[in-house]
Image (cartoon, rainbow, N blue to C red):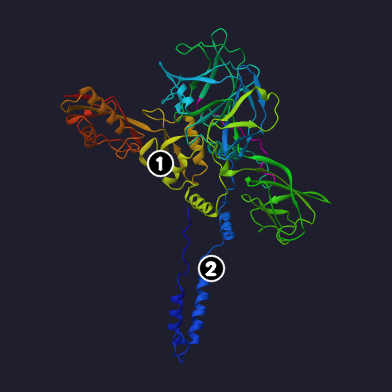
């Protein structure tokens, strides 16, 4: 986004000359020769040219000023970011296990044949075997998603409705080892499953915990007690059971280390059986595989989890390499010294800089600028994209002494050069005991997310968006926006009713704001779980205005059934017309995607007979509507409209369509 700067003065040279000529009679009435050959006119034109240049500079804001303005609103241009991917370590058949440490370095080649190094972000114990089959069982229906896995096509892990008891079966070619953890990496197709969402959940959990932390002496310098790192909170509702078949043909529960929050976030799940795993044992499925069964045992999802990829022996990696304690130069004793890092850019703009002289070693501090640096401050400024390190002028920031050795530790990245397609073959760069067990290493998903340093213009646009984004709930739109952004939830819609209490929606209740979150499940009448309601309540309570009271409530539904007699066009199948009418009515009355504009039925909007008749009449194969009645809930049929209470939604019932 480009910031539209105001034009402080739009005068140009010709206008300035004419303005000066018009003022001559006022200030010098004896000056009568105003032609271009007059020396005075020449001076006027010269001064107008100088004034025009001053006006041009007046309308310009230098980059260092823009950076300072951005820092006032808490925005810094984003440094270079490394690309990230998921690597799959395939072992040879019956090879057992192989321990791969975190921070292991690997490399592949790009389209030009150049090496692109990556670093593993987590340790992994790879096991032999592969996922050969994937099935889901929804009630009595079994679906085979094995080809979806082969072609990286998304599929629903527990069906589109994700009801209790639905199961996911992963068929493995070799049994899970009992002596080590086996890692499965899940990549989900959801905007709320990324690493950004994981960070938002952890950040909100940390803030909630800090509010509850005791502060014995609020005035003390260390009033905030040191707290241990927080772990990823469990899902507010869903509980999964991970099982395998033992040698007796019985299912037994596995030990599970779940970093996906019940398969709602991208990440790994480590499982470990307590006894030997047997082959087959699942009725209706091929008996050639060792099955891992994941069952939706309790709770309910806000939206059905959809897998883009499931990786056995998968681990996250990023296109960045550690440069540790590297000598980057030495001081020359002069002011404004600059040193360039090699290699560069610096990933995430994070650099640890130390120096060594005759007095010992010193730590230097990274600053965005030298505005607050003093003569004794060991500060430096880093341009992460170019790798240029700048030091102070002696008054603002200490200058490195002559012959003072400088050392840096940082991650270097190719930034956007690390973005690669999937299924690239990788190789280990570090020697690893047992590496002969490896068959191959590939990236299961494209390496993406690598970006160069953000420009000032882009950062300014981000600042404008941030200022437009509400962080305090004041208006009804603020409540709706913040509720939709609640970390750990996935909501389809939110309704906000100021001055209304959910239990007394017909009475004006000053100071009370009712918020009704609507998830995606169950499909026929979506209802948030108590855990989702609690998350939204806590998130809004920290952002509401003092003096207001937030009530987060479940939506209420009015079932609308249509009873109609329809005349079909000649030559059209009556059963087909009936099915089309049923589908059209269900779509129109859908609480999430129905309504007149197709964005969900508006809260409290009446169901009008004329609109229902229009929906039926617009259905292919319908000639005309002979009779039409509407039924609300358990009431009798009516020939008029149906009134819907203010905070209610509608949901379609079982329509009764007769074809003549």
Identify the image quadrant of the C terminus: top left
Relative to 416, is 97 on the left or the right?
right
Image coordinates of residue 576 in percent, x first then y, are 24, 24
Q: Magenta span: helix, strand or loop, mainly?
A: loop
Residue 235 visible? The answer is no
Classify 10 Å Cα crowding around label 2: few (below 14), some (14-19), many (20 and above): few
In this rendering, the answer to whether 480 lies above or below 188 is below
Q: Secondary structure at mark 1?
A: strand
Image coordinates of residue 204 in percent, x first then y, are 56, 39
Q: Earlier in the sequence, mark 1 or mark 2?
A: 2
Relative to 369, is 47 on the left or the right?
left
Q: Which residue is mark 1?
A: 496
Image coordinates of residue 401 in percent, x first then y, are 78, 56
In this rendering, the answer to whether 556 lies above or below 546 is above
Image coordinates of residue 415 in percent, x first then y, are 58, 44
Q: Residue at x 59, y 41 (%)?
A: 82
Q: CA distance from mark 1 to mark 2?
A: 49 Å
Magenta highlight range:
221-238
Front position in the image: 179 or 464: 179
Q: Which residue is mark 2?
A: 57
Instruction: Say whether residue 225 is magenta.
Output: yes
Classify 10 Å Cα crowding around label 1: few (below 14), some (14-19), many (20 and above): many
Relative to 525, is 459 on the left or the right?
right
Toward the bottom, the furthest residue is 30
Relative to 620, is 352 on the left or the right?
right
Q: Count the marks.
A: 2
Front position in the image: 296 or 548: 296
């Amino acid at each position: 986004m480009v910031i539209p700067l105001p034009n402080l003065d739009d005068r140009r040279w010709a206008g300035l000359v004419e303005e000066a000529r018009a003022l001559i009679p006022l200030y010098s009435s004896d000056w009568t020769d105003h032609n271009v050959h007059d020396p005075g006119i020449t001076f006027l034109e010269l001064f107008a040219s100088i004034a025009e240049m001053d006006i041009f500079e007046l309308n310009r804001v230098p980059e260092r000023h823009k950076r300072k303005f951005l820092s006032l609103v808490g925005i810094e241009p984003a440094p270079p970011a490394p690309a990230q991917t998921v690597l799959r370590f395939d072992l040879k058949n019956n090879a057992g296990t192989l321990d791969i440490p975190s921070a292991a370095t690997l490399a592949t080649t790009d389209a030009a044949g150049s090496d692109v190094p990556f670093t593993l972000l987590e340790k992994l114990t790879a096991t032999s075997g592969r996922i050969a089959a994937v099935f889901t069982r929804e009630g009595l229906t079994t679906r085979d998603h094995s080809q979806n896995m082969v072609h990286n096509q998304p599929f629903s892990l527990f069906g589109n409705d994700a009801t209790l008891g639905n199961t996911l079966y992963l068929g493995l070619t070799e049994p899970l080892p009992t002596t080590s953890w086996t890692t499965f990496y899940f990549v989900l197709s959801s905007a709320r499953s990324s690493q950004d969402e994981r960070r938002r959940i952890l950040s909100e959990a940390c803030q909630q915990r800090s509010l509850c932390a005791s502060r014995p002496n609020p005035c003390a310098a260390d009033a905030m007690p040191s707290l241990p790192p927080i772990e990823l909170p469990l899902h507010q509702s869903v509980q999964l059971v991970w099982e395998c078949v033992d040698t007796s043909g019985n299912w037994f529960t596995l030990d599970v280390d779940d970093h996906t929050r019940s398969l709602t976030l991208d990440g790994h799940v480590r499982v470990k059986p307590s006894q030997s795993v047997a082959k087959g044992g699942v009725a209706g499925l091929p008996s050639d595989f060792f099955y891992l069964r994941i069952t939706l045992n309790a709770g309910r999802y806000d939206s059905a989890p959809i897998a883009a990829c499931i990786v056995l022996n998968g681990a996250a990696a990023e296109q960045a390499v550690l440069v540790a304690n590297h000598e980057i130069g030495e001081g020359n004793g002069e002011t404004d010294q600059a040193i360039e890092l090699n290699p560069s850019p610096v990933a995430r703009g994070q650099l640890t800089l130390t120096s060594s002289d005759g007095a010992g070693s010193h730590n230097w501090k990274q600053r965005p600028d030298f505005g607050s640096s003093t003569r004794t401050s060991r500060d430096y400024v880093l341009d992460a994209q170019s790798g240029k390190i700048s030091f102070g002028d002696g008054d603002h920031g200490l200058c490195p002494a002559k012959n003072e050795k400088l050392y840096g530790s940082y991650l270097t990245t190719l930034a956007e050069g690390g973005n690669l397609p999937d299924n690239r073959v990788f190789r280990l760069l570090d020697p690893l005991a047992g590496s002969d067990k490896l068959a191959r290493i590939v990236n299961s998903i494209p390496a993406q997310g690598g970006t160069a340093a953000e420009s000032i213009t882009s950062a300014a646009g981000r600042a404008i968006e941030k200022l437009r984004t509400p962080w305090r709930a004041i208006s009804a739109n603020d409540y709706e926006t913040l509720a939709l952004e609640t970390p750990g939830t996935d909501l389809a819609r939110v309704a906000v009713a100021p001055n209304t209490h959910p239990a007394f929606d017909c009475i004006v209740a000053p100071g009370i704001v009712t918020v009704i979150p609507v998830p995606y499940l169950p499909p026929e009448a979506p209802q948030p779980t108590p855990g989702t309601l609690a998350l939204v309540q806590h998130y809004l309570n920290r952002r509401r205005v003092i003096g207001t009271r937030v009530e987060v409530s479940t939506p209420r539904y009015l079932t609308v059934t249509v009873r109609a007699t329809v005349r079909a066009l000649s030559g059209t199948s009556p059963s087909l017309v009936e099915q089309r009418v049923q589908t059209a009515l269900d779509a129109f009355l859908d609480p999430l995607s129905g309504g007149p504009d197709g964005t969900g039925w508006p809260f409290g909007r009446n169901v009008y007979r004329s609109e229902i008749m229009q929906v039926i009449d617009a259905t292919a194969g319908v000639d005309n509507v002979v009779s039409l009645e509407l039924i609300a809930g358990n009431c009798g049929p009516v020939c008029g409209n149906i009134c819907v209470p203010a905070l209610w939604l509608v949901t379609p019932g079982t329509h009764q369509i007769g074809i003549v």
